[in-house]
Image: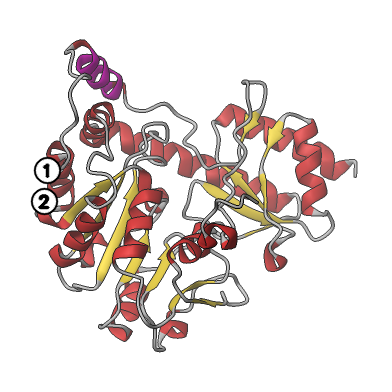
Amino acid sequence: MSQFWSQLVHTLTPYVPGEQPKGDSLIKLNTNENPYPPSPSVHTAINTQLAADKLRLYPDPNADLLKSALAKTYQLSEQQVFVGNGSDEVLAHAFLALLKQDQAILFPDISYSFYPVYCGLYEIDYETIPLDKDFAINPEDYQKPNGGIIFPNPNAPTGRLLTLDAIERILKYNPDSVVVVDEAYIDFGGVSASALINQYPNLLVVQTFSKSRSLAGLRVGYALGHVDLIEALERVKNSFNSYPLDQLAIVGAVAALEDNDYFKSCCQQIIKTRQTLTEFLQQQGFEVLPSAANFVFARHPHYDAAKLANQLREQSIIVRHFKHGRIDQFLRITIGTDAQNKRLCDVIGSLISNP
């Protein structure tokens, strides 16, 4: 540890992202990337922007083109839309702008592991709320004093979905607290809580283009909410980086948003493949949690998860294993293409048949 570090840096435990291996020899099912390329219109939009000799200029600091497209999509005003460099940056701004309060904030004990990292970075007190015995969020558990609430829906890494009615119960229990719903995976089986924004001024919905729009490499995220919440995010953003989205990200995201048929087709294919994989794993004796995401969360009563992950890697397949005490026997498996899924099933079937 360097003597030049600030005291805060000494206390931080950084987030560890999923492995990004070099080369193309592995079937990569560990980071929940979309197995399909983005809409062809994205390539056209980016190539047009490159040809226009505009990269010598700064991008629009407000990304008005993208905000306008998002506002139209969600039937909101542009003042109810915030955009940032991936949903992780949007979430980071939300923690600082909205969740840094006198009381501890609440989030599930099994959830996106970046949340406690943000709390450490911004020195925010927090309390984790245990998922129930079925690894689901119980809205009634959030009926207690707090400085704010955040949870993914569907939850990560479990994949379980809360209904809009359940989210409304949390909002009604907590009218004086900001409730952040992190919807990175909502397009694979849920209904966005954005439909509730005009009813609940304390609701902030965060989404990303990384998963269902196949744009993880462009880093585009956004938030939807009451104008007061959005203004708080804008104040933090403009005190940190006035140009979070480059020109290529802006035009690429708009193009992806406008090609709704392609978007729906990819989501439906992933949902179909998820069902096929779920049924296969269950036939092999796995417990598979109900998933509304582009991954499944599964464990086998007779096979150690860490060992199974290592055996899959030996067969050039990477999945995600978490060492958290309650879930250390689960594997999170990203939904790949049908060909990748078949290879995965063949290997798992062989491993289970020949332990």
Q: Is residue 232 left or right of residue 284?
A: left
169 vs 306, nearest the viewer: 306
Residue furthest top as drawn: 51
Q: Amino acid at mark 2?
A: Glu
The answer to whether 63 is drawn above or below residue 121 in the figure is: above
* Residue at mark 2: 78
Residue beneath the point at 32% across and 57% down: 93
250 vs 238, nearest the viewer: 238
Total numbered circles: 2
Residue 238 picture location, percent across and down? 21, 50
The answer to whether 353 is drawn above or below residue 256 in the figure is: below
The C terminus, quarter of image: top right
Q: Residues within 10 Å of mark 1 (few under 14, many from 20)?
A: some
Q: Amino acid at mark 1?
A: Ser
32 vs 94, nearest the viewer: 94
Residue 29 picture location, percent across and down? 60, 38
Residue 15 picture location, percent across and down? 56, 52
Residue 27 picture location, percent across and down? 64, 29
Q: Which mark is residue 68?
A: 1
Q: Secondary structure at mark 1?
A: helix
* The residue stretch that appears in magenta: 41-50
Residue beneath the point at 72% across and 55% down: 286
The answer to whether 306 is drawn above or below residue 212 in the figure is: below
Q: Which mark is residue 192?
A: none
Principal SS element in the magenta part?
helix
Residue beneath the point at 16% across and 44% down: 67
Residue furthest front as drawn: 3
Whether residue 159 is visible to the viewer of this picture, yes or no, is no
**Among the two numbered marks 1 and 2 on one chain, the one whose residue lies closer to the N terminus:** 1
Quarter of the image holding residue 10?
Answer: bottom right
Cα separation between marks 1 and 2: 6 Å
Q: Is residue 109 left or right of residue 285?
A: left
